[in-house]
Image (spheres, rainbow, N blue to C red):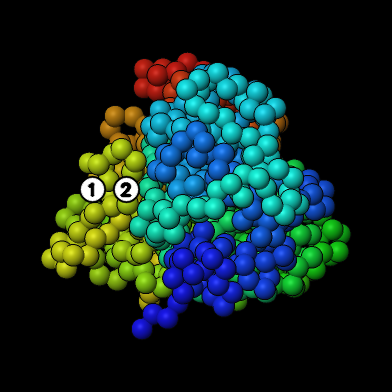
Amino acid sequence: MNTAPSPAARASGHRDARPLDARTIVEALLIRATGPHADEPLLTALDAGGEPVERLTAAGLDTRARAVAAALLAVGGVGDRVIVPAMPGLDFHVGFVGCLYAGMIAVPVPAFRASATRGSARADRLSAICGDCAPCAVLVSSPEAAEAADPDRLPSVAWVAIREAAGPTQAAESAEAAATPALPDPAALDPDTTALLQYTSGSTGDPRGVIVGHGNLVANQTAMRDRCEVGPATTIVSWLPCFHDMGLCTAVVLPLVSGARTVSIEPAAFVRDPRVWLRAIAGEDDVFTAAPDFAYDLCVNRVSAEERAAIDLTSWRVAINGSEPVRAATQRRFATAFEASSFRAAAFSPGFGLAECTLGVSLSPSLVPTVVAHYDRDALAEGKAVPVAPSDDGVELVGCGPALERTDIRIVDPHTRSALPEGGVGEIWVHAPGNCRGYWGRARESEEVFAARIEGADPEAVFVRTGDLGFLEDGELFITGRIKDLLIIGGENYFPQDAEAVATQAHPAFAHQRAAAWSRGADDREVAVVVETTERDPERLAVALRAAGIAVAKAIPATITMYAVARNKIPRTTSGKVRRRECGRQTRAGQLTPLGQWSSTAQVVQQKAEGDTSWGQHR
């Protein structure tokens, strides 16, 4: 029997309910904003130096969200879409929750930049998103921010300034909130209504708006809370951009369903100085974080041994590593470097997820050693996971944990749609309450991705097709690649991240750098690999390229062409994933400036094969 208070009772100030009883995050905030801890800090924003610049209690967030909701309802209605860009301080958090209070659909996007001229990738992406979802409004921090963002680019859309609507951060009440006693809208308390459109980052194609329901958010992050034992004593320290699904769930949704609090850092501040993140972690008692793989390498590269010794990371209990791919070498390197900081290697929790399932699908439990194993490279190419001893012929893979609670993971042959046995490599399919409803305005594609059924299985069981390849072993999920990125050589499947890992490990000039590999040529016998480097000496670079090219050629039976480019030149998604196909396109278009090149054939592929002239000669 369900004895939990009704949404109406909670909204009117029921003080005995807990956020973890809530069915939507708005309901969770209402419970917290009227409970005994309503006036304790919920959200804290740090500046570039790590000093607090803004704090919000649950009661304060509730008040400001109501005011933003009232301002939005003056220019739109329930179910309308609202663009919510990344903003400084806690403005994104306020704006996002304000959209939900109004019963509107939030559309998180990257920050507006005055320097993003029309025709740039950033401006084009924003234009495409707005054309797809037809927003009624755009939220900005202030009227000045609206002017700087060039409002003429969206002439028919209202621009709503959060700080003008909500008033001072510390205001206990606002005229707008008092004038709208019906807020939050009933839609905000209904788990079946749409909360946001999460536009995918576009690692393998054009961004698409994933329809995320209120119930999806709570179900997925409740499972994350339970797996990681996040509670009122936990502090979530996050620098992740809130417009991305991992950042949004980590910094906004998870604290509301768990009772935890959040300390937020601007992404740019972390990239400039990772010590800000580490010091914020050291300043708390029980810490949960989530970050992509590259963040841990950045900490090792940017923080000196002396500085590591001065930082105490004993309180870091959960360090989620969720990116593509998760590298055991990265975790080992970080654990070794920060051993002097009392960091525990078992704090690492590798995981797998995607926007189509809200976020998390599988995750290693906290303070349990990461599962790492080696598998035969040739067998993987044939679709079988065969364990081997560590060797040059083996591929090291990191286990991304067992499925989250109420999540069913199946490995399926993408062609026959038949389930594969344990150890079979196939497409990862997911059945879970966090599975979203589809892509906005794309009914046919939504049916294919979000309503998949396994041949010969229960027809009522509907799965999300992830497009990712992997296998299960003893309940542990291992990721091997993406279907669209596969290198098909002579009818056999090879994984691009395998070639990329071999290339970056072949010479110190490429160590701990990014790489991108893709098929080129019409006969599926050529593979190109671009690797970033800081090396500028032509002779040393030539030696490094040759070593990397030979190593890749030994792993993949194809003609190999290696390119070296400067750091941060390989195109990536907003979450840091390499955009391999886009890298290939930029290569063909001559949009990347090569520092060096090597080919396993005597004659370098010329303009006729690749369609560009800038990459046609050895350097």
From the viewer's side, name the closer residue of 194 and 538.
194
- Image quarter where the N terminus lies is bottom left
Residue drawn at the location 52% of the way across and 42% of the way down = 108
Q: Secondary structure at mark 1?
A: helix
Q: How many C-alpha atoms fall within 10 Å of the one at disc 2: few (<14), some, or many (≥20)? A: many
Q: Which residue in the structure is indicated by mark 2?
A: 438
Count the numbered circles shown. 2
Residue drawn at the location 63% of the way across and 27% of the way down = 146
Instruction: Identify which amino acid the numbered label 1 is placed on.
Output: Glu
Q: How many C-alpha atoms fall within 10 Å of the one at disc 1: few (<14), some, or many (≥20)? A: some
Picture coordinates of residue 332, whole percent (x, y): 63, 64
Residue 539 appearing in the image: no
From the viewer's side, name the closer residue of 381 and 471.
471
Q: Which residue in the structure is indicated by mark 1?
A: 447
Picture coordinates of residue 330, whole percent (x, y): 61, 58
Callout 1–callout 2 Cβ contact below 8 Å: yes
Q: In the image, 85: left or right of 197?
A: right
Residue drawn at the location 41% of the way across and 31% of the way down = 134
What is the CA distance from the residue labelled 1 to the residue labelled 2?
7 Å
From the viewer's side, name the closer residue of 26 and 381.
26
